[in-house]
């Protein structure tokens, strides 16, 4: 019950303070980065908490991947911020994993094997956003401008445990990317 009350209070407060409208205002931050879960692993939460409905989630992920592959936006490497070519983008869609398996017969030796598979849209369970935030002092609204977005795929150990989220690449919506450091 406390969890539901907290969530309701958070939503009510957020609705009053946050808007993605067009009036900018004072720059709060040139960049802020955070991950958004697109499909919640929590089954006891309301359907809309950390979750987009299936068809809308698929449409968003498809648009992000298509924009990258078709060169509709500039795409950058996550670690080096180097712009990627069309071939390099397609290469990011192929996952190669080294697994250690055990033979099913005596002496049950362990052996390494390489598994290569193409990226499935369902593999992308999170998006990382890089944004600018503005505060309108007149009405208290916060406006966000998306600078870039990065699809994240789940990465698992050979025993099936979630290792973390692997970033594929940044899609930039601004001419000046990466942003210069301060």
Image (cartoon, rainbow, N blue to C red):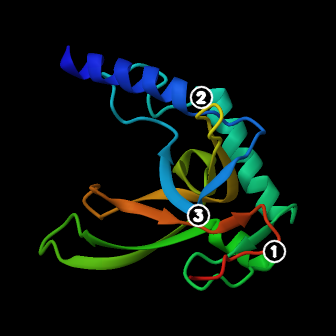
Tags 2 and 3 touching, CB below 8 Å: no
Could you give the CA–CA distance between mark 1 and mark 3, rounded to whole angstroms? Answer: 27 Å
* Quadrant containing the N terminus in the rendered view: top left
Q: Quadrant of residue 180?
A: bottom right
* In the depicted structure, whether residue 177 falls above or below residue 137: below
Q: Residue furthest left?
A: 107
Residue at 42 percent across and 35 percent down: it is 40
Mark 2 Cα-neighbour bin, 10 Å: few <14, some 14–19, many ≥20? few
Q: Position of residue 19 (x, y in %)?
A: 63, 33
* In the depicted structure, whether residue 17 falls above or below residue 64: above
Q: Secondary structure at mark 1?
A: helix
Residue at 47 percent across and 65 percent down: it is 166
Residue at numbered disc 3: 31
Residue at numbered disc 2: 54
- Is 132 in front, or is 102? 132
Q: Position of residue 88 (x, y in %)?
A: 72, 78
Q: Residue furthest front?
A: 138
* Quadrant containing the C terminus in the rendered view: bottom right
């Amino acid at each position: 019950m406390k969890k539901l009350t907290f969530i309701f209070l958070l939503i009510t407060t957020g609705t009053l303070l946050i808007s993605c409208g067009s009036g900018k205002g004072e720059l709060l931050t040139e960049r802020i980065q955070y991950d958004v879960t697109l499909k919640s692993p929590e089954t006891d939460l309301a359907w809309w908490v950390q979750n987009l409905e299936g068809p809308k989630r698929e449409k968003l992920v498809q648009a992000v991947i298509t924009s990258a592959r078709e060169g509709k936006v500039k795409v950058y490497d996550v670690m080096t911020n180097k712009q990627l070519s069309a071939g390099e983008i397609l290469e990011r869609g192929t996952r190669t994993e080294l697994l250690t398996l055990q033979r099913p017969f005596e002496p049950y030796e362990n052996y390494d094997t390489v598994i290569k598979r193409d990226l499935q849209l369902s593999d992308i369970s999170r998006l990382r956003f890089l944004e600018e935030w503005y505060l309108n002092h007149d009405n208290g609204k916060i406006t966000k401008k998306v600078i870039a977005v990065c699809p994240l795929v789940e990465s698992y150990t050979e025993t099936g445990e979630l290792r973390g989220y692997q970033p594929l690449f940044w899609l930039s919506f601004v001419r000046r990317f990466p942003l210069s450091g301060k």
